[in-house]
Amino acid sequence: MNHFDFNRHFKTYSSNKFFNEKSYAELLSDVTSLSSTFSHLNTIAIKIQSPYLAFVAILSCLKEKKLAVLLSHRESPSMIERLRSQIHFETIIEDHHIEMLLGTNNSQNVFPKINIDYPAVVLFSSGTTATPKGVALSFNNIYYSAKGFSEYFHQSENESSLINLPHHHVGGLMILWRAFFTGGKITTDLNSPIDFISLVPLQFKRMIEDYDKLQLLKKIRVILVGGAPLNQSLKDEARKNALILYETYGMSETTSLLMINGEVLPFREVELDDLGFFKVKGKTLALGYFQNNQFKPIPSDWYKTQDQGYKDDLGNFHFKQRADLIFISGGENINPFLIEEIVKENSLIKDAYLVPISDEKWGEMGVLLYETHLIDDLPFSELNNFLKTKLHPHVVPKFSFKTQLNLEGHLKAKRSELKIQARELYLKNIFSYDYFEVKDAPVIVFFHGFLGDKEDLKNISSSFGSQYSRLYIDLPGHGKTKIVNFNSSLDLFLKLSQFINLFSNNPIFYGYSMGGRIALHLALTFITPKFLILESAGLGLENKTEQIRRREDDFNQFSDLKQGELHEFLNRWYQNPIFKNFNEHPSYESEINYKSLHDFKEWRDSQNFLSAGCFPLIEENLEKLNFATFPLLYIYGENDFKYKNFAQRLLILETKIKVSIGAIIGSGHNPHKTHPLETTHLLTIALK
């Protein structure tokens, strides 16, 4: 391409809508209004929230042959100074500057020929240096990136793209350009007709979990998912809902997308070197970097990335991992060096490391470990407020922990060991628990029931004395363990099993009611216990229809409930005949008063993952018990006929393991409350 004819382009698509209700003719008029103001400026930083106004500013820079430097509209003053040290810019243009100039058209609506092979746009990309480096893209890079995409998908002027990624990043920027080059439309309205949508896995997850948004997704022709690997559970959800996903791979240096579902797009080339690193070249490869106010060109031959992958038998490429320390969280590249350097600007911080831990919601999540010069801890809110003044909100660490960083035997902390430490601190932060340790003794893990907490089962375990270590956990949505830290049933059970493994990899499980379902599922799928004890626990529902109905019923039982009505709700709950002994117990009223203080919305939301309808069917569980290797004790109350039936199902089970049944005479659904001595006696005998 010798040049791109902007004048013909605007004339061809003059009446088409470009951005919401703004036409291409209006876009040209706005660019003309603004561009004359840019004529006396040099390098221009664009710090604009509106995607449309940002695009007007970029086109104005092109028209006046000015270099456009893209900044986030939320960038902090201190970070702007860091970026300015990479490429100097005197002028920062914001939304209100452009809004004042629109409509003051005082120059010709004519585009001169532009320099297609010179830097046109600079955007900042995380790298192995503390301060992000400026990636310089030419107009040629942008044109061929868009052209290759449009050829692959046959994108046309009649199609609409949703702009929902940040336009100061290459992914969002190219949504604008791809629509522009095809004469198509950009929309900000998710409810309008959409043909193309670009999502990071976190955005996709949120959409498929929202029924109305899921219905909108089903109408979209091309759903692009990128910015981080897509986990298998999301792929399964997409398949279940008949959604065709296009997984993407690309980077700032390649002007966004290189591959779609492992296929290399037109005008790009990809190879793997001997160590499995991606090498790329082609018309979309960036010109170079701005660092320390110097331009460093990227050679036009093969550019080696820090990403490793492999090629399958069909010739498609697959991303495997990043070899440098940069990690991706929620679609954002996170540079630990940069954040660590800024954290240490705080005079109270002695040392700091940011390490990623895997997370279903974010892909990877940054955890900050730090030491201070203080004897007491630096309050999290104080450190967080400091970081918010220095960093873009997306890269502020999700969790921060004061800890010991000078690990024994090392001159400096090893990041591999810090990851292990970060995971442990994170898990101990999101779970509320009590742990009573007896050196070298087996660990019993206690799982309370629905509407309970970690205090519920302590009355039956105190008699164990020095024989056992005891771990009591507030299950998610109960006690002080908040449900917000768990994203799905699988995520909940993975985190719960990892948390338990911090204390023992072969514990004894004691689970009551809902806690029994959890203990059984953990035992059959995640952790093999030394012994499994179930009290009044369901073994699973009979069929999928019952599962669906139960999930809806368990969630909807809190419909229209107000916090002030919780005491009355609990009284009705415990009038169920299976709780007869408990609702006549001397401690009943004090327990109801205590439970009434709980946020009932936590209980409600926990049922998305912990309802009986979320667990495997009974036949599946009984089949797995046939191959179990741990002994099982099932305790039930004599007057609890529903759970007596579960005990009888276990009695006729043909299994290699020892199954014992214990009936508590005179008890209903919760023997540990109404008959603690008898329950403890059964436990003591079983554990001997």
Image (spheres, rainbow, N blue to C red):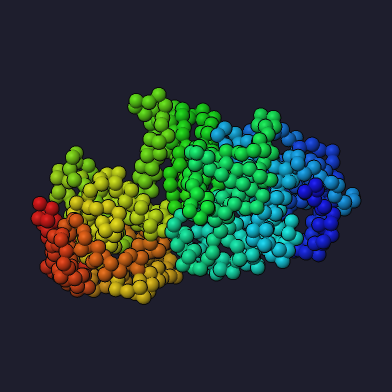
- Relative image position of residue 29 (x, y in whole percent): 84, 55
Viewer-side residue, 138 vs 192: 138
Q: Is residue 380 left or right of residue 546?
A: right
Q: Is residue 58 left or right of residue 554?
A: right
- Relative image position of residue 6 (x, y in whole percent): 82, 53
Give the number of marks: 0
Q: Is residue 538 left or right of residue 338?
A: left
Q: Residue at x 72, y 43 (%)?
A: 138
Q: Residue at x 44, y 27 (%)?
A: 373
Q: Quadrant of residue 673?
A: bottom left
Q: Quadrant of residue 524?
A: bottom left
Q: Is residue 117 visible?
A: yes
Q: Is residue 535 left or right of residue 255?
A: left
- Relative image position of residue 409 (x, y in whole percent): 34, 25
**Farthest residue in the bottom direction?**
545
Q: Is residue 93 placed above or below 511 in the rendered structure?
A: above
Q: Is residue 221 placed above or below 181 in the rendered structure?
A: below
Q: Is residue 575 visible?
A: no
Q: Residue at x 53, y 66 (%)?
A: 243
Q: Residue at x 46, y 34 (%)?
A: 353
Q: Is residue 390 placed above or below 628 in the rendered structure?
A: above
- Relative image position of residue 457 (x, y in whole percent): 23, 55
**Farthest residue in the top direction?**
411
